[in-house]
Image (tube, rainbow, N blue to C red):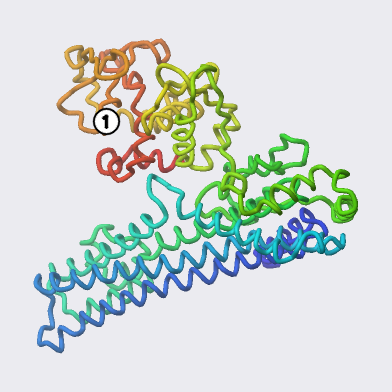
Amino acid sequence: MDLSSENARRLIKEIQDAAGEYGKWALKARKQYIDLRLRQDVEIRKLYIRAAERIAKELRSYVAKGSGHLYKRHLQELEISLRREAERIAEELTAQMNEYTRKSVEAGSGYSKAVLIDLVKQAEADDIINMADIQNLFSRVNTQAVEAIWARTKNGMKLSDRIWQVSESARNAIRDLIQESVAIGQDAVKTARMLERYVRGGANTLASEYPNMMKRMKGRVPKDISYEALRLARTETTVAFGEGTIAAARVTPSYKGIKWMLSKAHPLEDICDTLAEVDGWGLGAGVYPPGEEPMYPAHPQCLCVLVPIHEQPEEFVQRLKRWRDNPDSEPDIEKWYNTIYKGQSNISSAEIQRPVFLKIEKHDLNYDDAEDRVVIEKELAMIPGSHRELLKREGITIQTGYDISRYDRRNKIIRVGKKPEFGEIIHEIGHAIETIFDLYHNRDYLAVLQDGIPVDDINLAHIFMSNEFERPVYLLEHPKINKFVDRRQSIVYPLDIDKEGWFIEKNGVVIFNVKCLGEYFAEGYRIYLQNPQLLQKKDYKLYRFIERLM
């Protein structure tokens, strides 16, 4: 038996079991989403193929102009064309992403919309709850969900910025191939053919057909020029499907919660396994009540399934009939009718979008923390969903109104100083993350931390007191250290880690104890989310470590 077919059948049955009598609509939504995913891969690859073919055509034109080989002047001429193609890729990809996000949101929301329409018709309440108004309600929900996707930032960049980034990557890859062709004096026709082969078959094709060229390139071109765009589109389409599913469910009166189901194409255990097993509300494994829905997807390439759980149709139809005849008999439906259905023109984004998971409390009850909460929520929105889930699962809370910001490890509280600067909360979340992962006992992290630190050449002369931060601290400075992106990363704490000091003895030699660099990771975490390009350029190993940690 074909394993993929068997897995598909098992998943279909699990969706039907979870959705119950609403199964046909749940399966329809899933099918629309999968069809869109399959179609978008083909369309994006064609986009890159068309761009390469236009460049290849220009390369071949040099033969007609009497120049069979490529020279530096040709590359200068091609720069204009490469820039034009990058802009065209960005424009076309943006247009495609607009369509993908819109249709994915519609696919996700279609399930709950169909459920509501069916329940209203069964209860014969459509004289009170108008079908056109229901359509308008879900249309508004969809619009706000799409807007949220385009407004959300990842690694400090909105979706439009990331689209531009992948188009630039394509331009750079094509330019590198052409530059190498110029360097070896390769003829234009062969270069055009090589470019077309690369875009269609990837770097492995070039490695077999142009081994000398690829040896010279030394991995400077990606294995698949369209991979970044495909990965971006897949992730954002999945995000859109989740946004539509959750947002629509939350404005449906029969909604009881969302069920997280593992994809059958799920080879390694990760956070998704935890999300599918949690039963913290007595609703069953992997079922989350309204307001507690997990961030979806949990990671790039995630194919897990979200299935809204609605009240049994027979029960809800009876309740709807009672409400129709006596609104006071069903207070929850009456509240929905007045605040969501009738008041839909005043629905806020917060009512239909996923909540911030961490609890925000006041430490100083007399302090007005309204402005601080705006900053906190903006920074929380930058934290990856998997890490927000992690923080929530660990029971970490946020308190406002302190003199300075810091992470209280003992009580699991992120203490936020009054009037925090943007980035402070991310920094303290970095401390929480390093604590959860126990990084100062993690061999891989300690290797990253020590890289570029001349431990056997550091002495007390390289450590000095500084008053440039909120309180006096000791800083480490050494002419051989150039990995610190921010001065805060050079702060050293004498006795915070395992009761060790600045210097330890190893194999009979006294060396600097890198564990004393207690701000290195937290500040790197902040920079990764606010300015990833800077961290990647200055401290690539920390950048890659945090990327894997995400």
The residue lying at 55 percent from left, 46 percent from top is 298
Vertically, is 14 above or below 67? above
Q: Is 318 or 379 nearer to us in this picture? A: 318
Vertically, is 70 above or below 232? below
Q: Is 334 or 243 nearer to us in this picture? A: 334
Vertically, is 238 above or below 34? above
Q: Where residue 347 sits: x, y (%)? A: 61, 49
Q: Secondary structure at mark 1?
A: loop
Q: Where residue 208 sits: x, y (%)? A: 32, 70
The residue lying at 51 percent from left, 28 percent from top is 436
Q: Which residue is mark 1?
A: 486
The residue lying at 67 percent from left, 44 percent from top is 276
- Residue 503 visible (yes or no): no
Left or right of 448 on screen, residue 231: right
Q: Where residue 384 sits: x, y (%)? A: 48, 42
Q: Is 394 or 83 nearer to us in this picture? A: 83
The residue lying at 38 percent from left, 64 percent from top is 224
Looking at numbered disc 1 in the image, what kind of residue is underneath it? Asp
Q: Where residue 20 sits: x, y (%)? A: 81, 56
